[in-house]
Image (cartoon, rainbow, N blue to C red):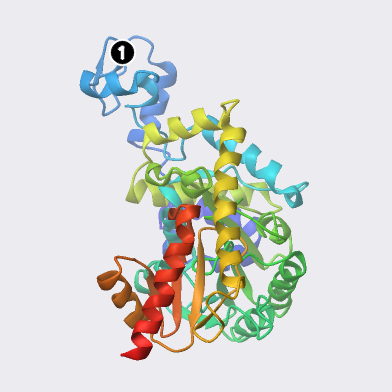
Amino acid sequence: MNPLAGQLNESIKAGNEHVYDMLSTLGKEIYFPKEGILSQSAEAGAHAKKYNATIGIATEGGVPMHLGVIQDKLSAFSPKDLYSYAPPAGKPELRTVWREKMLRENPSLEGKTISNPVVTNALTHGLSIVADLFAEPGDAIIYPDKNWENYELTFGIRRHGETVNYPLFTEEMTFNSAGLEEALLAQKERGKAIVLLNFPNNPTGYTPGIKEGDEIVAAILRAAEEGINVVVVSDDAYFGLFFEDSLKESLFGKLAHLHPRVLPIKIDGATKEEFVWGFRVGFITYASEDKDLLAALEQKTLGIIRATISSGAHPSQTFVLDALKSPQFEEQKDEKFQIMKGRANKVKALLDSGKYGDDVWTYYPFNSGYFMCLKLHTVSAEALRLHLIHNYGLGTIALGETDLRIAFSCIEEDQLEDLFDLVYAGVRDLEKA
């Protein structure tokens, strides 16, 4: 093992031996090089005042070399904020501004110790980093039966974790915290579990209420008290899009400092929060009472980044930072929020109107995010999906035998009634076939 990895491991052990035990083999072996091209380039940048012949970019006239056909389109920004490499951890000011935003929007983090957010290539990359650092073959990866399918690829296929699902909803259509607790306690012999919490949930668009959130935290605490090391990942991809009475902040805050056997990790980003999907700017943040442990986890995170993408895209980080600092940012973001809320409310009003009856479908609770799901009673979801796309030109997502996901996020409010009329017509067509 490289001595730098050993030093990081010792820092983690000293801070919390349970967290060290959570690390995968790769997580224990990974480190960020302190000697090499990056460190030597950084040293040269600070001290080589005459010539700096270390970094692998081309310069001209004291700025990064660039093409006019590109810079002409991006002339509002300085070449130094576009073309040179961003640091592996991301632009320092962006990390600071995002941290401030996180603390402002999550009051339960007050008084808690968290790492400085590290920039990732959007949220999938952040989840992949978690998988690399903590998932060993056979580890239990716990998440509900209604989930984003990429979890299986990221934690199951890539890292050979064992998927453990539990029903998302109870019979009363509230979050199934008892199911989560049961899945967790079943890992007592293993002594470790990785829990993925995704609110607003993809695909249902559901965010628990405050009482449900407390029950989730209590379930995780119970597992920790039973001697299970729990890595808890808050996948906050759709954070902030809360349209009704639900949690309005991430559970990351309540999980921070919960128990020595609980390691909370927040994965979030600008992609959906700030409506910049293609910019691919995300963040990964850890919580622990021990600052040296947090610093060591950050270094291991940078090691994964260095070994995979080296660093994130600089232009998109610059664009996001510029937007976050703009006086118009909050007003413009609220305008888009209100549009999204209007679409969600319109969908609920249509489904509650009685227009479609209650014999063909019911819907799962939704109060946030981009999506909602119908539970079909009389036809197959896949058969309906195919029928709708080929006969009505309408695209939807079939999930399992009964569930049909509809993204109201990409449908204008005045088009939603027509959309559900077509879905209803499609169901009736198949019933007659």
Q: Is residue 285 above or below residue 261?
A: above
Report whether 60 appears left or right of 274: left
Q: Residue at x 55, y 32 (%)?
A: 324
Query: Tag 1: residue type?
Result: Tyr
Number of numbered discs visible in the structure rendering: 1
Instruction: Quarter of the image for the C terminus: give it.
Output: bottom left
Quarter of the image holding residue 71?
top left
Of residue 31 and residue 80, the one placed in the foreground of this image is: 80
Counting from the top left corner in percent of width and height, residue 375 is at 50, 80
Of residue 166 and residue 56, the one placed in the foreground of this image is: 166
Q: Residue at x 58, y 40 (%)?
A: 335
Helix, strand or loop for disc 1: loop
Which residue is outermost to the front? Answer: 355
Quarter of the image holding residue 330?
top right
Residue 163, visible in the rendered structure: yes
Disc 1 crowd rating (10 Å Cα; few below 14, some 14-19, many 20+) is few
Q: Which residue is mark 1?
A: 51
Counting from the top left corner in percent of width and height, residue 127 is at 46, 59
Residue 160, visible in the rendered structure: no
Counting from the top left corner in percent of width and height, residue 74 is at 33, 23
